[in-house]
Amino acid sequence: MTAFSNLLACFVRTMRDCRWYPAGATASVLPMRSRYLLLIAALFGSTLVAPAYALPSTVKSIDAPWVYFYADSSAGKQIAKEAIPRTFSVDKALVKSSFKVDFTNTPAIYQPAVNEAVDVWSQNFTSQVAVKIKVLWERQSNPGILASAAPGKFHNNFKNIPDNDLWYASALADAIAGEDIEPTVPEITIRINSSNAPLLYLGIDGKCPSNKYDLVSMILHEMGHGLGFLSNADYDELYGYGSIQQPTPYDAYAQLPDGRRLMDLDSPSLELGKALTQPLVWSGANAIRANNGIKPPLYAPSTYEGGSSISHLDEATFANSPRDAVMTPNLKYGEVFHLPGPLLIAMFEDLMAKPPAGIPFGIPSVPRNVKALVSDKAAIVSFDPPINQRTAQISSYIIKVNQTGVEKTVTTSPAIISGLTNGSAYSFTVRAKNAVGISVEATTNAVIPQGSWRKTYLDATADGKHLAIATYGGKPVVAYSDTQRGTLKLATWSGKKWLIKTIDGDGTSGGRTNNSVAGSISACTNKVGKTEYLNLYYGDLTNKDLRRASFNGKKWSFEVIDGNGPVVQNYKEVDRVRTASDVSVSNACAITSAGEQVFYRDESQGILLGAVRDGKNWRYEIIDGDSEFKNRTMGDVAFHMKAITVGKSVNLFYDSVLSVNNVDKTVQRGEIR
């Protein structure tokens, strides 16, 4: 664990559904838009965005949501096909792309209709990269769901990307980059609800009966979503917050009545939540041209429908269109469309291009968290964007050296300000600029540049991912982890060099363990009589226990504090005993005149526990995460923590997450407690 100033915050992941709903479906048949919390920790003060994993080519990737198509029992129009699509094996002249379909468990009787829709898209979607599709045949909980689809991933920072602020569906990203960014992942996954098998029309002639749903039309629609026709917006139904943490090009073209882009609203915010339940239109030039000069309305009902809202064309406007009903949210009995239609093709042309810049609304607010760090004949100035960064459409930042008046314009943080004199004090102001004006300045702390520190290695063989610092016997000591070896090490400064010793994780003598102990560490010292003790607290990553190693100046002793109980003790039980929960994730120790204490997270239940040393035994208590009474919380707590002793009092700081964003893994509501 690093210094507390770099410690406290949380990123959170939830599961989100994007569904294609049946027209006229009532609330009773719509699936719950529930959220399931999965909490992960990150650094305090960092931008709340989903942790994107990096591929070898430096492309960033995140998971994409599902979009669902729902059935409507009312009758729909049969839209005649302009031409019967031919397979590209017959007429390669028409082919603009190729698709590889993995039918997995889909029965053979349904495959011709799927192939028919695939052939249509092969003649209308342009890409040099084969699009991999996985088709699943499975029962879904809501019979109103006809089918669902999701892109394999959203990608960013890939070759030829039109706008690096946006996240592109796999197939779009591959087409733009001209290469398969992630060869092992299908670009599209489609799930057909097997519960509706008797209601599906399997023919490819477009003559769907008035009591059936046309499977070709269903797959044509779902492929549109899989190729990139979807928003990455999320809506908190309890509090009304909206969020778009990683906007797609679809979100860049979704526009409010006042001309602002949906993606430019502050996220998360109530304003964005309101926008998700009010009229929205598509602002792409190609689609407007295809829609007779009118901005196509998007589906944005006043009651947000997760998986349907935003990611479709407006039902009321296009449901009866002879050509452009493909991407409306509902499919009627007998409704047939076997061509994408000019509007959908035009919208994909927009999605492949760089969206126009948003409209700046107002002057930027003041930059936040400005600070200056020392460098050699230079300073490093860092800052966070203003709170209204999206609505203000900030173009640059102006950094001024207060002592000389020299200014430097940058677009990102941090910025290196060179040409300074070592030994002289400098401070800086930072202003944000957009097309409307320039913000009020924010002033950094003063720094004095100085010669660079000489780098030395405390231990060149260990990663030190987790560490704790203390003073023992008047000497600095650093306890740290060695992940590769799974050990806990201690470095002691002799006055001339660091003396390295492995404390635990490499043997079983004297109460040690062979299990990996390269996790969270805290260190505290105390004195009993004339004997000074160095106490290290750390997790056994195999048995999921909390361990303690104590040094009295002559030898080490080892014990398990908690985690080796017979059963997981329910958080509702007041009288606490040893538990079998995973207690290896995080901990913080404290020493007062009253004795030795350690606090730690119960990963199995998301609560904060404590243990007080009572002679040779330990007394246990529950600190937080179990109740909403007496200012406690039911939030998921204590991924990170720090204990500070002031006199006889112990102050414990820890994180708590109350609600989260779906899919993109960010906190929407949380606390530092």
Image (tube, rainbow, N blue to C red):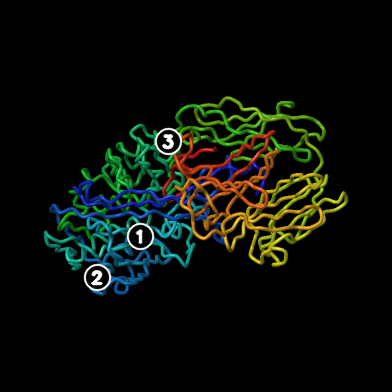
What residue lies at 29% left-to-right and 67% top-to-bottom?
A: 137
Looking at the image, is 614 positioned above or below residue 333?
A: above
Q: Residue 105, percent across and down?
A: 32, 72
Label 3, label 1: how many angstroms apart (C-alpha)? 36 Å
Q: Residue 394, percent across and down?
A: 52, 34
Decide: marks 3, 1 in contact (CB < 8 A)? no
| Nearer-N-terminus badge (3/2) | 2
Name the residue tied to disc 3: 269
Q: Quadrant of residue 660?
A: top left
Name the residue tied to disc 1: 125
Categorize mark 1 by other alpha carbons within 10 Å: few (<14), some (14-19), many (20+).
many
Task: State the residue lying farthest toward the front.
Answer: 615
Looking at the image, is 104 positioned above or below residue 436?
A: below
Q: Quadrant of residue 375?
A: top right
Query: Which structural element holds mark 3?
Result: loop
Is there any visible trace of residue 324 in the rendered image? no
Total marks shown come to: 3
Q: Residue 663, percent across and down?
A: 43, 51
| Nearer-N-terminus badge (2/1) | 2
Residue closest to the eye, 649 or 380 = 649
What residue lies at 76% left-to-right and 36% top-to-bottom?
A: 419
Quarter of the rendering occupied by the C terminus: top right
What residue lies at 46% left-to-right and 48% top-to-bottom?
A: 573
